[in-house]
Image (cartoon, rainbow, N blue to C red):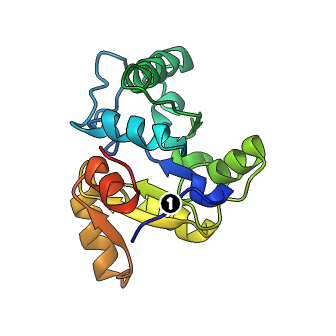
Amino acid sequence: MTSSPTDSAQQTVILDRDGVINQDSDAYIKSDEEWVPIPGSIDAIAALSRAGFRIVVATNQSGIGRALFDEYALARIHHKMCSMVEEAGGFIDGIFYCPHTPNDQCDCRKPGTGLLRQIESEFGISLAGAYFIGDSVKDVEAALAHGCRPVLVRSGKGLTSELALRSSGVLDLAVFDDLAQAIQELFPVNV
């Protein structure tokens, strides 16, 4: 299964952050010191960017709503992530995040599709058919609800999510060990 950048949906790849790009933590990633990339993820993102794909990150960050860190700390984390991708020769085109807790019942927290609608509005595109790479059931649910092509990685919460999705009947799902393998298999780029 390969894709080439021929239209806006195929030119855009949506990535979850925690557990996909960086190591996840049940205690939340609260600072740039705690943010550690998963091996191969930065180079994979850079390779995809160099091949002409638009890279956007869609991430739930309820640690803000829980007062575990603030938006300044989140900005430092994202600056570190973007700088590492740029040092590898790539670019992250946009980062969209939900700061709310599950109790807030917002529409931007995945599996809601508010972040995906924000991306469409920001770039003036449709994400129907775009790849959405995540490690959680919520990522897959958001992708399916918005007409994106879900891809699951086994890093982060991916192994548990894969079992849950398979037992609930979601069988038509591309699954890879990590982001680097997903990008190498799905796209015509050299990671």
Is 12 left, or right, of 30 in this rendering?
right
Instruction: Count up the numbered dots.
Output: 1
> Where in the figure is residue 69, as x and y percent of width and height?
45, 21
Residue 42: x percent and y percent? 33, 33
The type of residue carrying mark 1 is Tyr
Residue in the foreground of this view, choosing between 176 and 3: 3
Relative vertical location of residue 14 with respect to residue 80 in this rendering, above or below: below
In the foreground, 8 or 26: 8
The relative height of residue 122 versus residue 130 in the rendered view (above or below) is above
In this picture, is 99 found above or below 128? above
Residue depicted at x 57% and y 38%? 97
The residue identified by callout 1 is 131
At 35% from the left edge and 39% from the top edge, which residue is drawn? 21
* Residue at the spot 29% in from the left edge and 72% down from the top edge: 164
Counting from the top left corner in percent of width and height, residue 177 is at 21, 57
How packed is label 1: few (under 14 Cα within 10 Å), some, or many (20 or more)? many
Residue 107 at least partly seen: no
In this orientation, does residue 121 appear? yes
